[in-house]
Image (cartoon, rainbow, N blue to C red):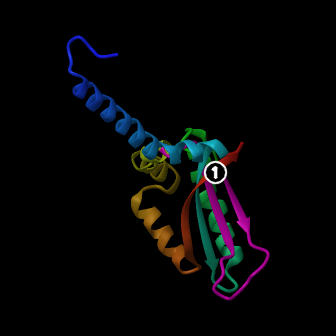
């Protein structure tokens, strides 16, 4: 139906622009819609894989129990993390494989944004300050090597 105020050619041009706009929106947003069709986003995990130097496992686990566990417990108590877990790998595929895994669970990606400022106070409380935490890190380097540190998002299949 032609408009009383616009010529037919202008109406066709407006209609084509709308159709192109809708087509572009579908192209841009379709992958997101398809991805969300199969799963919902879950929590985010920071997973660190560590290779412990030979004959140093007890020393490393003692260090984790005495310093990392209290730090993580305080983060959990303050609501900065949801949970944490330690794993020991029971199979070794090669000498360069990892031995211990530390997995820290965060509610979502946004929870990671506020960490640096808030964890400094926990670091000072648990370790006694920046210098002491640095010394502990150096001491750990003597008994273990970080193989990999990954950020993973848990997905919940529908």
Residue 40 horizontal side relative to residue 20, left or right: right
In this rendering, is residue 2 above or below 46?
A: above
For label 1, count other residues whose C-alpha is less than 10 Å away and answer few (under 14), some (14-19) or many (20+): some
Residue shown at the point (46%, 41%) measured from the top left: 26
Residue 32 vs residue 97, the one in the foreground: 32
Residue shown at the point (33%, 29%) measured from the top left: 15
Residue 19 vs residue 79, the one in the foreground: 19
Residue 6 horizontal side relative to residue 53, left or right: left
Q: Quadrant of residue 4?
A: top left
Residue shown at the point (74%, 82%) measured from the top left: 92
Point out residue 86 in the picture as x, y percentages from the top left corner.
69, 61
Point out residue 43 in the picture as x, y percentages from the top left corner.
61, 46
Residue 122 horizontal side relative to residue 10, left or right: right
Residue 31 vs residue 15, the one in the foreground: 15
In this rendering, is residue 91 above or below 117?
A: below
Point out residue 48 in the picture as x, y percentages from the top left corner.
59, 66
Residue range highlighted in magenta: 84-109
Q: Which residue is mark 1?
A: 154
Is 93 inside the magenta-drawn segment?
Answer: yes
In this rendering, is residue 107 above or below 71?
A: above
User: Can you say which quadrant of the picture contains the C terminus?
Assistant: top right
Judge whether residue 116 can be spotted in this image. yes
Point out residue 82 in the picture as x, y percentages from the top left corner.
62, 43
Task: Check disc 1 and report its element: helix, strand or loop.
Answer: strand
Residue 75 vs residue 97, the one in the foreground: 97
Residue shown at the point (35%, 39%) measured from the top left: 20
């Amino acid at each position: 139906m032609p408009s009383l105020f616009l010529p037919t050619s202008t109406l066709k041009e407006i209609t084509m622009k709308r159709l192109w706009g809708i087509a572009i929106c579908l192209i841009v947003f379709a992958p997101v819609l398809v991805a969300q069709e199969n799963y919902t986003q879950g929590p985010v995990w920071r997973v660190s894989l560590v290779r412990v130097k030979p004959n140093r496992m007890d020393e490393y686990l003692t260090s984790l129990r005495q310093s990392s566990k209290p730090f993580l417990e305080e983060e959990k108590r303050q609501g900065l993390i949801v949970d944490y877990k330690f794993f020991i790998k029971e199979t070794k595929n090669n000498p360069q494989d990892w031995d211990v895994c530390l997995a820290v669970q965060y509610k979502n990606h946004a929870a990671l944004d506020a960490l640096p400022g808030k964890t400094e106070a926990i670091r000072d409380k648990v370790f006694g300050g920046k210098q002491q935490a640095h010394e502990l890190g150096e001491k750990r380097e003597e008994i273990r090597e970080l193989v990999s540190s990954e950020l993973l998002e848990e997905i919940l299949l529908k």
